[in-house]
Image (cartoon, grey):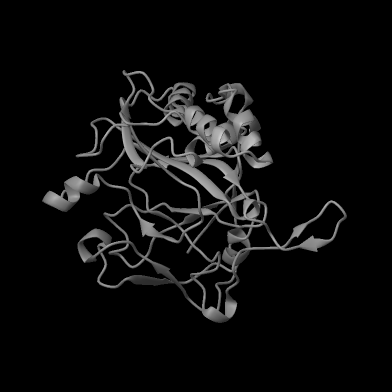
Amino acid sequence: MLHVFDGVLAPSTSRYLHTASSLGELGDELHTVFLRDSPPKTAIESCLQSILRELNDPSPCVEYWWRDEWVHVEAHEDVDEYLFESTGERRYPEHAHVLYLTVGRAIRAPTCVWDRTHEHAPRSGTLGDLSIVPARTGRLLRFNGKRMHGVPRPTLRWFPLSSRNEGVSAVSSTEGSSQRPTKDDLVRSVVLFNTWAVPPLDVETADGAADPREVIRKLAVDFSSPKIDALVEVMETPDTHCTPRDQWHSVQIERAPAGRRAREPVKVWLLGDKERRLHPERTIELVAHEELARALQEEVAVTSLGV
């Protein structure tokens, strides 16, 4: 089952977590785990702990990483990566999540989740029904840890070249005219996290995490600018917990009506080697629903359709 919630983070919390992560809170090791019976070591861990409590999720271990740019993520299912590399065994998280901290207003960069697991896809030549979840600040996506998922970039990357666009649009100024997007308009800052009954192999905890407040204070001593001052102001008021569950908005998944298929097949890229992707080719061709392009470029609504 796939769930999408809006309003999970207050705007101030989104800003704080994005800023803390941008200041290198996790250092060079952006992929880490934490055990929930230990005190949180980072602002992100405090936030994820609060989210899982609101979800009544008892999982004892959380694997997480942060990404602040929109990158093309090939279709895959999450596994215990180091265990798979050493033994070939596929062990899956209980649930996978995407927490959208900050999403620029100029991009359409959805997360796409299929309903098939590796036992059936892509070996069967189909990935099953597809749910398309637009990236939106403060949103939480939660789904079964075995399900395949990915992020296309450009937005229409799966389509023939003649049909593609970058998925980046001009933005409106306060005067109503269009202008080129700024760097902030193109940000896609997300925390990806998986819950586990047993920790994944050889993933370290964040014991060496930096205090982002100290990082920005030191920068402020050496450099003075309105931008640095704004970051200092954000970091002076820690805001790491999600909103209460009764303030979350459960987003309904809109089922696209049965319709004609697109004339041209789409080509979805698969992650990893043959053993990892369970398919002889790097891509799999699928027949697209006529609504696929529209759903990929949707700003808010979550859409489910056949592919």
Residue extending farthest left: 87
Q: Quadrant of residue 46?
A: top left
Q: Nearer the viewer, residue 87 or 171?
A: 171
Marks counted in the figure total 0
Name the residue rendered at 64%, 56% in the picture: 298
Q: Quadrant of residue 270?
A: bottom left
> Picture coordinates of residue 155 (x, y %)?
55, 64
Name the residue rendered at 61%, 38% in the picture: 228
Is residue 10 in view? no
> Picture coordinates of residue 176 (x, y %)?
86, 56
Q: Quadrant of residue 73?
A: bottom left
Is residue 133 in view? yes
Name the residue rendered at 63%, 38% in the picture: 224
Q: Nearer the viewer, residue 189 or 223?
A: 223
Residue 136 to residue 94: above or below: below
Q: Nearer the viewer, residue 118 or 93?
A: 93
Residue extending farthest right: 175
> Picture coordinates of residue 6 (x, y %)?
61, 36
> Picture coordinates of residue 64 (x, y %)?
37, 38
Q: Is residue 93 left or right of residue 241?
A: left
Quadrant of image for the N terminus? top left
Name the residue rendered at 59%, 37% in the picture: 138
Residue 303 to residue 236: above or below: below
Residue 251 to residue 47: above or below: below
Residue extending farthest front: 222
Q: Is residue 248 left or right of residue 114?
A: right
